Image (cartoon, grey):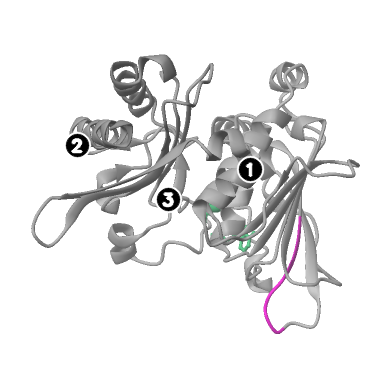
Amino acid sequence: ESVVNRIAAGEVIQRPVSAVKELVENSIDAGSRCINVVVKDGGMKLIQVSDDGHGIRHEDLPILCERHTTSKLRGVEDLESIKSMGFRGEALASIAYVGHVTVTTITEGQLHGYKVSYRDGVMEHPPKPCAAVKGTQVLVEDLFYNMVARRKMLLNNDDYSKIVDLLSRFAVHHIGIAFSCRKHGAARPDVHSIPTPSRLDSIRSVYGLSVADNLIKVHHSHSHTPTSSLFELDGFISNSNYLAKKTTLLLFINDRLVECTALKRALEIVYAATLPKASKPFVYMSLVLPSHHVDVNVHPTKKEVSLLNQELIIEKIQSAVESTLRTSND
Ligand code: ADP
Ligand code: MG
């Protein structure tokens, strides 16, 4: 059974950056205002995510790393209305099958926290009382120690820059949260964002002036029926002065960071037609869709998103982007 579990876990957590994404999303879901990430050896030796969120209750610790343990799905009605896409209760379980997990956590109003370690998803000993300030710290050590081939492949293929890229994206979208990301032992973080009321400020602080000074605001809301909109789009897109070698698409759907290759290609087509000299855009886009239009179970990594009416939505986004670019060029 444990081999089957390990293989399944390796599908959900494919590399260190997938573990970081799951842990940071848990911290975001916990209402954190401050999230700090420390990484050693590209995440293979150590990943530490600390937050100041609501913490994990003592009685939830024994089953925390069992599969399908989630506090984010409490009845069938929730399934329809749930905003959170990380609701499947698989992430921590998966990480605990392919790495050594230690959780330190304290909930509101407690005098001390608890520290507990997991192996193969099972608690190694009863939670030990310990000092703690606020929130949760999850430490993952020796990722893929039990998957020889994977470990070998990843040790030659450092994920640190992917992790920095991930945290940069989170920092742009979640402007009320302070994020930091650093290498273990490094004096300075490589991502360091502070809460700001302005999206443009967050882009400026993470991606620099050369990006932020060349952005145009884009907004579109597409009415489906008189009472509900099919989708709403808010974002920033680069103008004709932004010249880059590759396209950057920061895409959030219902506040979840996702990837959509089809949309990326579609944006490149619009830019090639409208701004041929600046055909590799920088695009930050936040879409709000009815949750039943988003299929999150398409792939265990939940990265590539699948949408109902995807072609229609992409077409609408293309025309919104195109008209925004044309108006700004006049
Ligand atoms: P999911 O996020 O899909 O519910 P996970 O395996 O990622 O599943 O997490 C399991 C549960 O552990 C969550 O539902 C949540 O209750 C709890 N949890 C995990 N990380 C944190 C955290 N940083 N702060 C508070 N609770 C957490
Ligand atoms: Mg989760």
Tell me: residue 260, above or below residue 204: above
> Mark 2 and mark 1 in contact (Cβ < 8 Å)?
no
Residue on which disc 3 sits: 85
Disc on the earlier residue, 2 or 3: 3
Which quarter of the picture shows residue 324? top left
Across and down, in percent, residue 70 comes to: 51, 59
What whole-number distance in Å separates the C-alpha atoms at marks 2 and 3? 19 Å
Nearest to the observer: residue 196 or residue 83: 196
Across and down, in percent, residue 224 comes to: 12, 50
What amino acid does circle 1 point to?
Val
Disc on the earlier residue, 1 or 2: 1
Across and down, in percent, residue 94 comes to: 61, 42
Where, quadrant-wise, is the C terminus in this rendering? top left
What whole-number distance in Å separates the C-alpha atoms at marks 1 and 3? 25 Å
**SS category of the residue bearing label 1:** helix
Which quarter of the picture shows residue 132? bottom right
Nearest to the observer: residue 6 or residue 268: 268
Q: Which residues are magenta?
A: 103-109
Residue on which disc 1 sits: 206
**SS category of the residue bearing label 3:** loop
Nearest to the observer: residue 89 or residue 45: 45
Q: Residue at x 28, y 58 (%)?
A: 80
Tell me: residue 280, above or below residue 307: above
**SS category of the residue bearing label 2:** loop
Residue on which disc 2 sits: 309
> Mark 3 and mark 1 in contact (Cβ < 8 Å)?
no
What whole-number distance in Å separates the C-alpha atoms at marks 1 and 2? 33 Å
What amino acid does circle 3 point to?
Met
